[in-house]
Image (cartoon, coloured by chain):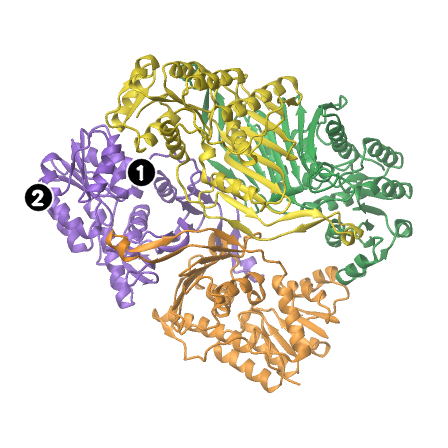
Chain colours: A purple, B orange, C green, D yellow
Amino acid sequence: MRIGVIGCGYWGSKHLRVLQNVQDVDQIVAIDAREDRLLALQRSFSSLPSFRDLASALPHVDALVIATPPGTHLGLALQALRAGKHVLVEKPMTTSTAHARRLIDEAEAASLILMVGHTFEYNAAVWKLRDVITSGELGDVYYINTARLNLGVYQSDINVIWDLAPHDVSIINYLLRSRPTTVQSWGSSHAHTYLEDVAYLRLHYPQLGIIVQIHVSWLDPCKVRRMTVVGSRKMAVYDDLADQERLRIYDKGVVAASKDDALHGLPMSYRYGGIVSPFISLQEPLSIQDQHFLECIRTGRQPLTDGENGLAVIEVLEAATRSLAEGMPVALEAVPAYGDHKVHRVYG
Amino acid sequence: MRIGVIGCGYWGSKHLRVLQNVQDVDQIVAIDAREDRLLALQRSFSSLPSFRDLASALPHVDALVIATPPGTHLGLALQALRAGKHVLVEKPMTTSTAHARRLIDEAEAASLILMVGHTFEYNAAVWKLRDVITSGELGDVYYINTARLNLGVYQSDINVIWDLAPHDVSIINYLLRSRPTTVQSWGSSHAHTYLEDVAYLRLHYPQLGIIVQIHVSWLDPCKVRRMTVVGSRKMAVYDDLADQERLRIYDKGVVAASKDDALHGLPMSYRYGGIVSPFISLQEPLSIQDQHFLECIRTGRQPLTDGENGLAVIEVLEAATRSLAEGMPVALEAVPAYGDHKVHRVYG
Amino acid sequence: MRIGVIGCGYWGSKHLRVLQNVQDVDQIVAIDAREDRLLALQRSFSSLPSFRDLASALPHVDALVIATPPGTHLGLALQALRAGKHVLVEKPMTTSTAHARRLIDEAEAASLILMVGHTFEYNAAVWKLRDVITSGELGDVYYINTARLNLGVYQSDINVIWDLAPHDVSIINYLLRSRPTTVQSWGSSHAHTYLEDVAYLRLHYPQLGIIVQIHVSWLDPCKVRRMTVVGSRKMAVYDDLADQERLRIYDKGVVAASKDDALHGLPMSYRYGGIVSPFISLQEPLSIQDQHFLECIRTGRQPLTDGENGLAVIEVLEAATRSLAEGMPVALEAVPAYGDHKVHRVYG
Amino acid sequence: MRIGVIGCGYWGSKHLRVLQNVQDVDQIVAIDAREDRLLALQRSFSSLPSFRDLASALPHVDALVIATPPGTHLGLALQALRAGKHVLVEKPMTTSTAHARRLIDEAEAASLILMVGHTFEYNAAVWKLRDVITSGELGDVYYINTARLNLGVYQSDINVIWDLAPHDVSIINYLLRSRPTTVQSWGSSHAHTYLEDVAYLRLHYPQLGIIVQIHVSWLDPCKVRRMTVVGSRKMAVYDDLADQERLRIYDKGVVAASKDDALHGLPMSYRYGGIVSPFISLQEPLSIQDQHFLECIRTGRQPLTDGENGLAVIEVLEAATRSLAEGMPVALEAVPAYGDHKVHRVYG
């Protein structure tokens, strides 16, 4: 198996490093228009063939990882699929639902694997959090609140919603095994002339009665990667920066007060309990993801984060963009229940 | 000077404790309909006359602190003002702007002091943060983000916006020496049947080009009291729970990239610097506030947090309530610039 | 029951406040040579009789709490016991074992309650930690490491060992239900001319095979109150400043490697697991302690922190003082096993 | 320039990675007895010649980095020096002062560079801390307290003192530009049969009047890398795990009280001020160190962490070992003042 990585910046080089240690990979190929990047890579990687453009590289690869700016995803992915190559495209998959749909159709017609790089769905802490939710340990989930804040790094072709929110939307769709039906958003550009650098999204999952509030920012003094899930019985906080305790489960809750308490003017009764940080064995999510890509290619299995999964995220981003412009909530089209990932064969 | 405190629950007893150590106070009087509370207070306070209702207490006091549920503020304050007593009313001042206006008019007509218990305007960390903003150290303020989260304590007659947001609105009006012109809000009731227990507010201060986002919650596993002020030159975080460093100033910033950087695909340039936590001498804000109340009574000085100040907060809460119902931003009526606190005499 | 508190500084006023809310107390009496302190107290406490010296106060009390500087404990306690009053003396009980023994004998001869203010033995987090150790959850306890650091507050008549280490020694004797047989210590005076302001103690509990290292300091920029208990199966950290999680239990351990691992050069094998912070219901330890004092007086029950308990701590401090001077470990005399607190009647 | 790295475990592979990006390096060579390690490296490094033993590798290198277990350092370094190769040996340099002295003599006789891998002396946070001390900002340094705690990783041939304390001793010698004259230590083996896994060292720098207390452990639930420097004017905490604020300077101090305060029973007066975390630009210390090695080879400059520097650390470790056995402080031989690093030519 020969894999090309196009776009060898920060994230692309991570793919190169990770793929180097994946067993089925026979050859890695680097593709980037910038000569300086390719030269730097030569120092670090053994026998790394490199190309300046996709066309010249295609004959030398069986599959392609696309880690270029989002605006180029559609074109590069189509080019690869049409040449019969499997494709793993970084998030956001594309810059519109129409484009995402085109990629899905193209891959299906050609019986090729199309996968989206929603890395967090390969993160053991996220898996554990889904287990905790699914098992009923939290009771009914009331709402989810997330913050993904940074100082920088501004993208040149997308705003902070398209840059950071794909992570949160993909994680929450995954946690809830569902998709939102309404999206509202607010954003503002402060340091940048026109790209929003601070934004808030509000997603409704009415089948579940859950509201999700997402805060993304390129303009915060503190790096934050936090998700709070509030349930009727317990509450969980997933902090991706807390190395030793990414997940903390609080045995705390609020319920309507008993008649007795209500008589004494207490509307609610509170339960305070301990805190548990389950041990989560660390394995690099990007590595698990890229191995999964190779396994899907080998076996014809549908990827966990397939095109439809990527499209579901793009739908939210697109709706958020409209909401930003219109100042109103935007309804997503009725979507079929988003059940467990179906494992069926794409080809052969 | 004889001062009555009506409503001797959690917050009212704090006033009692604080007033006990204020020099000009000759006599404190407790007023509460609940006999058990009055009995408990007798144990802790020396010679504390107490009454079951305001009418019986009024002849024995010169001024009144109102710490009862918000729905009762108007009635009690009117009753006191009409009896010629100065009034300090806890936040939120009233449950509508019309009521707030009525109190202001009544106090003015009677040449009595009317003050609102916006304690944070008497907090040395908030003062320091205003100094930092005013001095230009942060550059242009871009936006402010706040979180005031709790597990509990639910109020019986107001939702989480009316309970917690008065603090944030009063602090931000004070910091910016201005008032918002538009308010938008979202909220939802999860554990409570109908009162919103999680909410977000978005305030516009268009004269300053500043957007403020407020998050309040009775349903969070972690107690949070945090305000982030993002400026073009520096950023500040005020964490009211960080005893030793309530205020941290980050010498970090983002500016549009130079032409050179822009050519290399970097839209912005970042500045990373040190962090400074200025020393803030601690004095209990409630005590400073209550001393100020007494000083205003003695001198006829207009309180820093006078009726107009309280009304400005109620306007925001009322607009937030409408926005919640209508799902749209709500404009506040054009308000005169909210300059520095004028110190003029109310009477004498 | 009428209780006097002698020494109405920081700690003495805490006793006054706490005793005010203890049911059996009919009358509290304040005793202090400083008029200004007594005047300040009059403002805060209802009908508080006060005296300038013990002799005048004794006829008006049945029991005495001694919160004066350690050098005065012996004299005041003897005076009170000889007048037939029960005594609760603050830590350190006395400044020598001989003095401590004298108090014990005097109280026993007079059938009076003698109790020492080792507050931490009435702290729910310490109780929980002892349960965790006793239950075997930690496996064999290997060693305990503590840090009790401050900036200030220097005492005028004792060094940092006598000021801060009584807490740690009393907690650890309590946790291990045992006493050390050897004590070594090092200390140095830096900011103070001659009183040690930074010190380390090393205690051996050879029956249990446990070593304890204590670090006390008046000269640290950060306030620290931490105790780490390392066991063969799990480890626990008790942080008295972590309001929400005073106790954290780490499911981590190290054991000698299996033969197989050893062959591959790994001397040990490690176990990493989750972290649990059990919920600990907060009740003020000083209040529990003072209630216990009153209950012991009423029932004739032996206090949990009786004279012998206080003496055991003084023995360690005295040995530490000798070790400091001699630069050598100092053996405590063979002590009988220090079993569970015997509950027997002192009188009646 | 061709460089060999012998010992390609955790730390050796770091050298390989770092050397790959150093400009003057023409060829890197891996040397390890374990075939599996060499095979794994082949995957990650481009054209990496490898050898199973030093003898076969020597003809292919000009310089050698030794990252094998400490017991083998002497033999391998001698072998390399005798073959005319420059040597960078990992810490601890050797397992005795006699061995260290032999290496120094051998290198000097052969006019070869001998350098010790005391990485922290190439760490920008340590540089900044030395600047702060040297500038007098802290006032007189009173004492230094360090903690370097881990769960694991046990070494097979050295105890925790020889494993972890070299870092602290090298940092403190560097910070103070001096060496201790007395060393005392205590240690105990808990989980390991005979190697001490928890230990404390106490170093005296009497010329400076400074005492240093070092705590090292393989048996702690929390990873800690902290150094507190207490001065008469300010205090500093260097926390190597605090990514964003490795160094914090506390504007706090304690001084003997004025006569007036002393009269009121206050022995000391305290100064509380702000906290500053200076910005420290991050560059990987290992990379700076290895570049320095190459620069020294090229220019004949004496390394900052030369043999004498390494020997100074070994002297402390050796004394600590004797103190552990004898239970007494151990004096180091009178050492010449350890001034600023002399930059003189070794050869050429």
Chain holding disc 2: A
The quarter of the image holding the N terminus of chain D is top left
Residue B219 versus residue D110 in the image, above or below = below
The x, y position of residue C103, in whole percent, is: 85, 36
Mark 2 lies on a secondary structure that is: helix
Q: Which mark is residue D278?
A: none
Residue drawn at the location 36% of the way across and 14% of the way down: D83
Q: Earlier in the sequence, mark 1 or mark 2?
A: 2
Chain holding disc 1: A
* Image quadrant in which you'd find residue B212: bottom left
Q: Determine crowd level at label 2: few under 14, some 14-19, many 20+ residues with C-alpha closer than 10 A.
A: some
* Image quadrant in which you'd find residue B22: bottom right
Between B163 and B298, the one lying in front of the other is B298
Residue A186 versus residue C344 in the image, above or below = below
Q: Is residue A145 left or right of residue B118?
A: left
The x, y position of residue C223, in whole percent, is: 61, 44
- Amino acid type, label 1: Pro
The x, y position of residue A201, in whole percent, is: 33, 58
Q: Which residue is mark 1?
A: A285
Q: Which residue is mark 2?
A: A82
Residue drawn at the location 67% of the way across and 73% of the way down: B294
